[in-house]
Image (cartoon, rainbow, N blue to C red):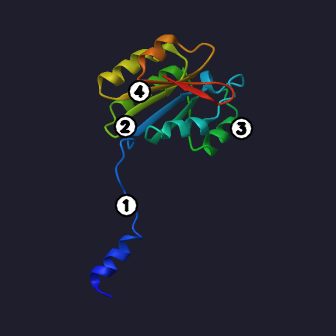
Amino acid sequence: MHSLDKLSSFKEYLPIKTKKASDKNIGLLVDGPNMLRKEFCLNLDFVKELLEESGSLRVAKVLLNQYASDKLIEAIVNQGFSPMMVAGDVDVQMAVEAYELIYNPNINIIALMTRNAEFLPLINIAKENGKETIVIGAEPGFSIALKNSADNTIILNKDSEHREK
């Protein structure tokens, strides 16, 4: 076999990696006390799948307060998320974490899973710094301002179906 023939047959076994437009890195922060509630029955695996349509999930943190059960923490870890226990106000820590993602050059998309309008300034700062923004929420109580300020909005319901803006 000629060396050129060997090379061409070898190429058949090499995976060809092509860079897609969706090869963006996503940082996701989940407002645990606000979103992981029994009345919403939200599935974090489903959220992960939805986000992976936009890029690679590089940061996936769920912020929790001191009332989070061991069972909830275990479920979060089993779904590939990093739980963060917060002694004080979860919203303050989530803002700090989001701010770090905004200034992380390896993150292209900031995704916040919350219904809380208090995160509107973070969405605006992320966009001012060239980051794409995604807000994931649920009704009732999903801030209209938050929905309208993000580049993309995902509204989850109990059946894990979604609508996107």
Closer mark to the observer between disc 1 and disc 2 = 1
Instruction: Tell me the amino acid under the disc marked 4.
Output: Thr
Is residue 4 rendered to the left or right of residue 152?
left
Residue most extreme to the bottom: 1
Give the x, y percent position of residue 160: 65, 31
Q: How many marks?
A: 4
Q: Which badge, 3 or 1, is on the more N-terminal residue? A: 1
Give the Cα separation between the discs numbered 4 and 1: 30 Å
How many residues crowd mark 2 within 10 Å: few (<14), some (14–19), many (20+)?
Answer: many
Q: Which residue is mark 4?
A: 133
Q: Residue at x 64, y 27 (%)?
A: 36
Give the Cα separation between the discs numbered 4 and 2: 11 Å
Instruction: Tell me the amino acid under the disc marked 1.
Output: Ile
Closer to us: 151 or 93: 151
Q: Residue 71 has which mark? A: 3
Is residue 78 rendered to the left or right of residue 63?
right
Q: Quadrant of residue 48?
A: top right
Q: Residue at x 57, y 35 (%)?
A: 47
Give the x, y percent position of residue 58: 44, 42
Evaluate if marks 1 and 2 touch, with contact meaning CB atoms under 8 Å apart.
Answer: no
Q: Which SS class for mark 3? A: helix
Give the x, y percent position of residue 63: 55, 30
Closer mark to the observer between disc 4 and disc 2 = 4
Q: Which SS class for mark 2? A: loop
Q: Which SS class for mark 1? A: loop
Q: Which residue is mark 1?
A: 16
Q: Is residue 115 above or below residue 49?
A: above
Q: Residue 107 has which mark? A: 2
How many residues crowd mark 3 within 10 Å: few (<14), some (14–19), many (20+)?
Answer: few
Q: Is residue 109 above or below residue 35?
A: below
Q: Which badge, 4 or 2, is on the more N-terminal residue? A: 2
